[in-house]
Amino acid sequence: MTAHTPDAPGRVTLTMIASEAGVSVSTVSKVLNGRSDVSTDTKERVEGVMDQLGYQRRPARRRGAVVDLVLNELDSLWSVEIIRGVDEVLHGAGASMVLSAVHGRSSDTREWIDQLAARRSNGAILVVSDLTQQQRKRLTALDVPFVLLDPVGNVDALVPTVGATNWAGAVSATEHLIALGHTRIAHLAGPRQVLCSRARADGFRATMERAGLPMPDGWVVHGEFNDTSGRAETARLLDGLGASGEEPPTAVFAASDLQALGAFEALRDRGYSIPTDISVVGFDDLPVARWTHPPLTTVRQPLFDMATVAANALLRIIDGEPADQLRLELATQLVVRGSTAPPRATDGPGSRVDT
């Protein structure tokens, strides 16, 4: 192992520790939080690097700190994973969490900032919250550090963000379907204005183009990251194709697990069998994905780890340290389950089954 010289005296970052130990930043975060899902050898290696580089844990300011966690919505399994991750870090650090939902309304965001100022919060983690430049300036004026988790729009270069490799995840999902033999693949995309949604759609398109596969007009359908939207998107796609006499796709890549679950409903409503007639891939790997029928093939987005990394980053800033890294993306991973299979070879694509 090669010794690494810190950028400045006492300035040792989690990224440096991860690089020296040969692990991910999220693994270093787990060691710092005393997580049990890290092997003894890995824990000892990471702690050895911390000692070697002189990493200092400074809990003085963070103990007793109040941190706001702000989400668009609280009623989704996606949000639950984020809340769990942030809570684990804050609880271990002796800090408190205040949970808010803005429901995508700017008025609720202004109200939340007023409440934050009144309770003198020490910091904030903003999840899918598209703050205006004016709102960001107000947070800065209040001396409230913040980290954006999975940001919606373009972000100031100096604002710390934590996300996932959305483009690469979409590529792996599309490549999986192509490797199975699918050539007619539709994409249930998320909102057009959301960065992660655009990255997933771009990854899908790039992979299809590289494989020389057609993408007919209307085969990329935009909606919201929920099951209601996924069902409506799928119905709109299939009904439109049926009206024109065009063959349906043999596979669907959904931009979220919840959209994929909505696709399950719409496909079954129309007599399609999954994956015999149409394969389905999701994105997120929420806990429910393994319990669907059939279990959902999906791209694992490390939501819990993203949340713990964001919380640790904020606590370091609260402690008076600079952000470990302004742009951090955690790796995604394809998880193959029962909702994908090769297309039907005998009866043709999209053949219905009796129900």
Image (cartoon, rainbow, N blue to C red):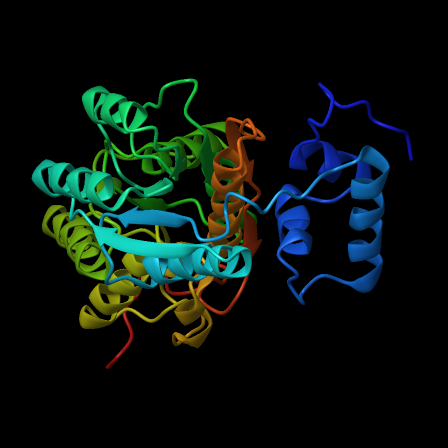
Residue at position x 8%, y 39% in the image: 107
Q: Is residue 57 visible?
A: yes
Residue 250 on image: x %, y %: 37, 54
Which of the pair 12/209 is nearer the observer? 12
Q: Is residue 345 visible?
A: no
Taking 348 as reference, is 323 above or below it? above
In the picture, residue 146 is in which quadrant? top left
Taking 92 as reference, is 177 above or below it? above
Which of the pair 93/268 is nearer the observer? 93
**In the image, is 202 to the left or to the right of 90?**
left
**In the image, is 10 to the left or to the right of 74?**
right
Q: Residue furthest right?
A: 1
Taking 133 as reference, is 240 above or below it? below
In the picture, residue 115 is in which quadrant? top left
Residue 33 on image: x %, y %: 62, 56
Residue 9 on image: x %, y %: 74, 22
